[in-house]
């Protein structure tokens, strides 16, 4: 892809290469999420769509589970969604390249989501 070429030829240091990788992941996230929500394997779909010989018009129709010309099928990506993803990725990349350290949460084994709300009603504890 073009971002791979940027990482190889124009990214002069490791920070810039990491920034390019962050942008790549951010650009792949929407299609991966859509594919997962449709019961497909997001990584496989992204892999197919990012092959060098894949036409730009080709996309994944999650409703029918097939690769189609997105324009001919009437499936379009709102510009705001794409722009927001790129802006957010650039923001994170800029933050990481100017920071000397980063604190992240280690994911729990087994996946699991956030814990549920504790039992109780409205109001402050002890006020009932």
Image (spheres, rainbow, N blue to C red):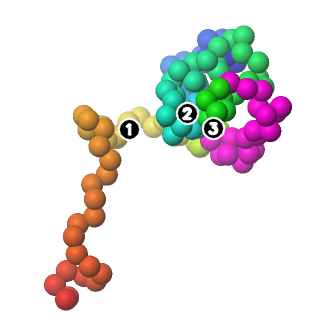
Q: Could you tell whether 89 is left or right of 96 in the image? A: right
Q: Position of residue 45 (x, y in %)?
A: 57, 24
> Considering the image in quadrants, where does the N terminus appear?
top right
Q: Which residues are magenta?
A: 67-85
- Residue 102's quadrant in the figure? top left
- Residue 119 vertical position relative to residue 36 in the rendered view, above or below: below
| In the displayed structure image, the side of residue 82 where residue 31 appears, left or right | left
Is residue 26 something that shows in the picture? no
Q: Secondary structure at mark 1?
A: loop
Does residue 10 appear to the left or right of 41 in the view shown? right
Residue that carries the numbered disc 2 in the rendered image:
35
- Quick check: 80 above or below 71? below
Q: Decide which of 99, 35 is in the foreground and name it.
A: 35
Q: How many angstroms separate mark 2 from mark 1 (CA)?
A: 30 Å
The residue located at (67%, 46%) in the rendering is 81
Residue 65 at x, y = what percent? Answer: 61, 29
Residue at 24 percent of width and 34 percent of height: 109
Residue bearing mark 3: 63
Q: CA distance from mark 2 to mark 3?
A: 9 Å
| Residue at mark 1 | 102
Crowd class of label 2 (few under 14; some 14 to 19; many from 20; radius 10 Å): many
Q: How many marks?
A: 3
Q: Which mark is drawn over residue 48?
A: none
Quadrant for residue 90, please give it.
top right
Q: Earlier in the sequence, mark 2 or mark 3?
A: 2
Tell which tag, 3 or 1, sits nearer the viewer: 3
């Amino acid at each position: 892809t073009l971002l791979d070429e940027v990482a190889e030829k124009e990214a002069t240091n490791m920070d810039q290469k990491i920034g390019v990788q962050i942008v790549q992941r951010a650009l792949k996230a929407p299609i991966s999420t859509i594919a997962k929500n449709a019961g497909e394997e997001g990584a496989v779909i992204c892999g197919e769509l990012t092959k060098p010989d894949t036409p730009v018009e080709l996309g994944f129709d999650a409703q029918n589970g097939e690769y189609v010309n997105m324009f001919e099928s009437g499936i379009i990506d709102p510009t705001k969604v794409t722009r927001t993803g790129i802006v957010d990725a650039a923001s994170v990349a800029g933050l990481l390249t100017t920071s000397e350290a980063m604190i992240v949460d280690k994911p729990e084994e087994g996946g699991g989501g956030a814990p549920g709300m504790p039992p109780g009603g409205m109001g402050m504890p002890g006020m009932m």
